[in-house]
Amino acid sequence: MLDYLFNPKSIAVIGASRDTKKVGFAVVNNLIKYDFKGKIYPINPSANDILGLQAYPSVSKASSEVDLVVVSIPAKFVAEALKDCAKANVKAAVVLSAGFKEIGHEGIKLEQEMLSVARDNNIRIMGPNCLGVINTSNNMNASFAADMLSKGKTALFSQSGALGVAIMDWALEHNFGFSKFISLGNKSDLNEVDFLEYFINDPETEIILGYIEDVVDGKRFMEIAKRATKVKPVILIKSGGTEAGARAASSHTGALAGSETAFNAAFKQTGVMRANGIQELFDTALAFSGGKLPKSQRLLIITNAGGPGIIAADTSDRLKIQLPQMTKESIDAIADLLPSNASLYNPVDIIGDATSERYKVVIDQAIKDPNVDGMLILLTPQAMTDVSNVAEIVIETSKITDKPIIASFVGGKRVRDASEKMKMHNIPTFAYPEIAVKAFRRLCDHTEWKHMQESPPPVSKANKEAVKTMIENLLDANRFEVGEDPAMKILAHYGFTFPERALATSAIEAGIIAERIGFPVVMKISSPDILHKTDVGGVKLNINSAVAAEDAFNEITTNAQRFMPDAYIEGVMIYEMIKGGKEVIIGVTYDRTFGHMIMFGLGGIYVEVLKDVSFRIAPVSYKEADEMVHDIRSIALLKGARGEKPVDIEAIINGIVNVSNLVTDFPIIRELDVNPMLVMNRGAFALDARIIFETK
């Protein structure tokens, strides 16, 4: 269906005008000016001809076969115009008109009416409130943009028309070519996912760029994005991540999560590369313009200046890019042809007076060297530097090697022409070495993603019927937030192990239970109204006698009543005290776009202070759970620092997957914390838990 949008044989412009200040004039003018080969039907009941083309009062009067209409009339007339379009078998409409949901209630009604007509007649809608669509391969500029884009292999969709115009202007200044440009507008029908899916098989598109502010369907976005990134690089700017005015979350996990966190997790799980601005968007796209990916992340830096070489090496180290030495045979081969004071290792410094011949010596050897997966050619324009010849060598070498070559000719006037020439020959070329290294990192990331094996979804072995009954009973009792025993019983069915425990309802009973469990014990207030027990003095550790247990019962209940006098106190839970291990947290929160997010990090009272956590969108595979564990900064503490034994990483991974299975099986769970989970050298104990259900 989208072929009618990008490759129509005929286009009708509803609202075509002779007035040069009107959008309807600009669209017709662009179609004619840039030589669209299909038929053009200006639609205006008050004109006989527009820009030399016969005008028609309606689409149905123009032809019985129109593939695409571009609509530029007041919002209140759009639905009726689409009814007429149906008579001409219109397949797609680009609605430029504003005045729909972006203006509020009345606009929402008009947009719904327009959509209803479109769906009844199988017409796909792009927009409304958009800039239009451009396809450079057939010279179709069905937009009111001021210029036409150059031909290229990059497609761009933008949720913001104004930003789209700015990106187009930037691209024109930098001679950056496009295959297609799409202004999404209000996304009433067609959205970013539809275009992502189309570009997967579009032979004219090799790189996919986008600017989005939100996603209509998070699950479908992840499904299609994962398919797209296995074929082509997808680079997106996502704005609006601060989520001002976000709700106050009840759980640790909810407090640490947000829209920005969800998008970062979704991008990581689907291989989408995130750009933090227009410059980075195009820098990343430029990295892929050469059409070559490294086999691995071994980069050889060749430079005629020590400073830029060191900057590139430092950046490589920070980005975990390997800087290998060439083989002994390669080093011997270049040693005889370079000055004695040249550095033959990595970076290869061929000294400030280097000519193009010295660059050629190293480059020719590097393309044959098995230790080199890619090259970064650095150059500063010193007096004896033949800049243009070096550029020619880079261009010619790139034609005969599968290894990516990236260039950074550092300077201004003296390197400008050479840099532009390399870009014209699809050599990724950057003004500064650190940006060039980041570009190589992006290539490596995409290589790793493309070759990454899909991890099978985990299979839940839990007793779902038992858990279903527990949850139904809790909800029937209007218990939408539960901790301790109810939460632990649910989680126990999903593989979690808890210390021995029992509820005491009096001080004397506390002493008896504590003796039965065995000292030392932990005592915690038990109340459906108190989720953060430590905050109210509701936790006591290392209770070593029956008398101490009785005293602790009285102190804990008194503290709880003083801090939260309206709370319902069930009693005090007494737990077997587990010693040793490391405290971690596994949690869940719910994102309105992507659904359940799973969190992992260091646990206990420090989780919200340190914020050393990682997130993924459920369902989470074992491989993704392993990545989550290794994402946190403090992973060394879990692996055994300063001679300590490592904790059971596999037990953590199993816990993450089990929580993911639980919320996948029971989506009514909205938030969950297992905090802390004490991970031992072998195995793990969940010491506390709570679950929050969706309220109807």
Image: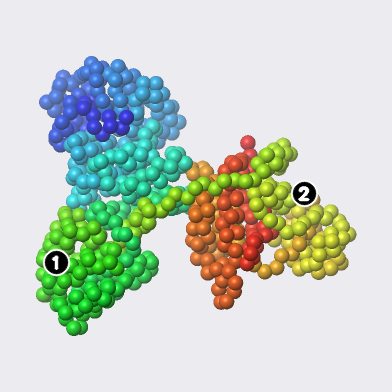
Report the amino acid beneath label 1: Val
Q: Residue furthest bottom?
A: 340
Residue 262 place in picture, x, y as percent: 48, 50
- Residue 459 in sight from this viewpoint: yes
Please indicate whether residue 575 sits to the left or right of residue 19 in the image: right
Choose top left, top right, bottom left or bottom right for residue 24: top left
Q: Which residue is mark 1?
A: 390
Q: Above or below — where is 302 with respect to 286?
A: below
Please indicate whether residue 490 sits to the left or right of residue 238 in the image: right
Neighbourhood count class around disc 2 (C-alpha, 10 Å): few under 14, some 14–19, many 20 upward = some
Q: Residue at x 49, y 61 (%)?
A: 631
N-term-proximal mark, 2 vs 1: 1
Report the amino acid beneath label 2: Tyr
- Give 197 or 417, whichever is nearer the viewer: 197
- Give 315 or 300, whichever is nearer the viewer: 300
Please indicate whether residue 680 sits to the left or right of residue 400 in the image: right
Nearer the camera: disc 2 or disc 1 = 1
Q: Residue at x 17, y 26 (%)?
A: 39
Q: Above or below — where is 553 with respect to 306?
A: above
Q: CA distance from mark 2 to mark 1?
A: 79 Å
Q: Residue at x 60, y 61 (%)?
A: 584
Neighbourhood count class around disc 1 (C-alpha, 10 Å): few under 14, some 14–19, many 20 upward = many
- Give 430 or 117, whichever is nearer the viewer: 430
Secondary-structure class at tag 2: loop
Q: Which residue is mark 2?
A: 568
Q: Which mark is residue 113?
A: none
